[in-house]
Amino acid sequence: MKKILLVEDNAIILDNVSEILGLEGYHVIAAKNGVEGLSLAKSKKPDLILSDIDMPLMNGYQMLKEIRSDAEMQEIPIVFLSVKNYGQELVHGLQFGADAYICKPFDLTELLEAVEKHLKK
């Protein structure tokens, strides 16, 4: 069973996406902020990370930078999920090393296709 780390500070989104991914057969590890997400990424070594960008304590960019600088985690695919849907943010996320960027609110099919695609890497 593939492990997905979901890092999201909005409890409703965290619960809903966790449930959806669980129903699709994935083992979901949930984190409420970037600090918790980074810690869980180090200890659980997920197959994929889905992360919000704007979060308390450590934002998605900072978490991504830490993950990409760690030799044991730098190959984990990371997909940003964010309400920031303007081009500059997308480019910024990809420059930091994100594998993809999905704008909220997103379509369920779009999310599941991105998950499947990046788990094949």
Image: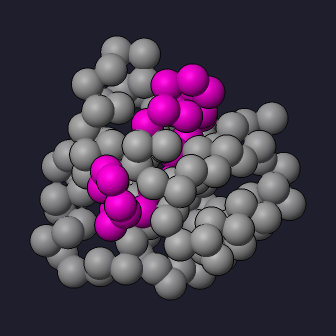
Identified at 62% across, 66% down, the residue is 14
Residue 40 in picture, x, y percent from top left: 55, 34
Residue 106 visible, this angle: yes
The answer to whether residue 56 is above or below residue 34 is below
Instruction: Tell me where the magenta segment starts and ends, as one range.
Output: 38-60
Identified at 25% across, 46% down, the residue is 62
The answer to whether residue 76 is above or below residue 33 is above
- Most extreme residue toward the top is 71
Residue 101 visible, this angle: no
The answer to whether residue 38 is above or below residue 56 is above
Residue 78 in picture, x, y percent from top left: 43, 46
Q: Quadrant of residue 80?
A: bottom left
Check residue 3 for magenta coloring.
no
Identified at 55% across, 41% down, the residue is 48
Identified at 16% across, 59% down, the residue is 92
The answer to whether residue 93 is above or below residue 96 is below
Residue 32 in picture, x, y percent from top left: 53, 56
